[in-house]
Amino acid sequence: MSTTDRAHPGTRPGNGTTEPKEADAMAQPTEPVTTETATETAVVHRSRPSAHSLLGFAERYALLGLVIAIFVVFAVMPSTSSTFTSMNNIATVLRGQTAVGMIAIAAVFPLVTGNIDFSLGATSSASMVLSAGMMANHNIPWVPCAIASLVFGAIVGTFNGVMVTRFKLDAFVTTLGVATLLGGLITWYTGGQTIYNNISTTLTDFSYAKILGIPEVTVMVIVIAAIAWYLLSHTPFGRSLYAIGSNPTSARLVGLPVQRNVMLTFVISGTVAGAAGLLRLAVVGSGQSDNGTSLLFPALAAVFLGATAFRPGFFNILGTMVGVLLVAFSVSGLTQAGVNSAVQDVFNGAALLVAVGFSTYLGVKRRSRG
């Protein structure tokens, strides 16, 4: 991984914790600053757990090991062993996590810059209702509806980005307000009813199709996750986002386009959330009247859990996907074991609290090593 990928989960732009000597080094580079050198010098690499040390290995792969352990426990537990490991159950769990996985991917982009987007769940739900309404009320084919979902998500993301970067509004308050607004519009448009007429069978059939036993919608999430991983980990743009999240002032001093890049993260996240709405419509087969909260919090739990894995203390796509699997299979196993249906909300809330606390601890520990 690049040594520039340095960001503390949950920090806000302007509240960077880079120490003065590091800021001075970045403000006064010893060689000409170009786009590449700016990105490479934006954040000074600090010590990280050795890949060969037991502690470093445990930090990186503990979450993955936990997923495997949970899978094994439910696979041998008498009350769940006959159903939990079946391909049908695994496919059902993966298919059901399509929208959550997409929203989790979307959430990573603003978070690496120190911002959070609380409107992603509502954007996804509004996108789903928009496509369902176009099909049900106007008999519009699924392709234009898909384009409309993506464009809608991009518009919402652009609005959020403008409010945060141009008008300097707090991202938390702005996106929470947008989420509330979209939730109201969804209820107004649907009248609180589910839209289920004339939903494209091509779209719904796609959600049931499989490749090597894996739902095609899950394959699509994997492809999008791979693109996001490459963008964040192996491009100057991605490295600049981590630099901005670490210390936007220092990033600005070395010539990184902070305002533009933060704006782009909101546009990307909104577009991915719009796509999540379309995939959710394919999976559910109807446009449901809800504000997306049931999708947002599991996604955020997965993202913060992911910040404790592979690259502890950093928001990352691989860890996020493992976090999605942890939440999904844990809830599925507990439900099959006969635990009350409220376990999903309890588990998601507990996982989010633990993940935020642990990822924050890892960020503090990494700063102290500098």
Image (tube, grey):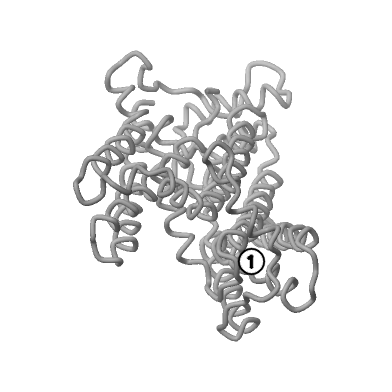
Q: How many marks?
A: 1
Residue lying furthest front in this view? Answer: 82
- Left or right: residue 36 versus residue 89 is right
Is 128 rendered above or below residue 157? Answer: below
Position of the C terminus by quadrant: top left
Residue lying furthest top in this view? Answer: 52
> Which sits in the foreground, 248 or 145?
145
**Residue at point 52%, 47% (across, down):** 111
- Left or right: residue 254 versus residue 325 is right
**Residue at point 73%, 23% (across, down):** 34
> Which sits in the foreground, 164 or 206?
206
Q: Picture quarter containing residue 270?
A: bottom right
Q: Position of residue 349 (x, y in %)?
A: 33, 59
Is 321 rendered above or below residue 32? Answer: below
**Residue at point 39%, 34% (across, down):** 309
Q: Amino acid at mark 1?
A: Met
Whether residue 197 can be seen here: yes
Residue at mark 1: 128
- Left or right: residue 213 versus residue 59 is right
For disc 1, the neighbor class at 10 Å (few under 14, some 14 to 19, many from 20) is many
Q: Position of residue 223 (x, y in %)?
A: 62, 38
Is 28 rendered above or below residue 339? Answer: above
Q: Picture quarter containing residue 26?
A: top right
Q: Picture quarter containing residue 139?
A: bottom right
> Which sits in the foreground, 30 or 298?
298
Q: Position of residue 300 (x, y in %)?
A: 45, 53
Secondary-structure class at tag 1: helix
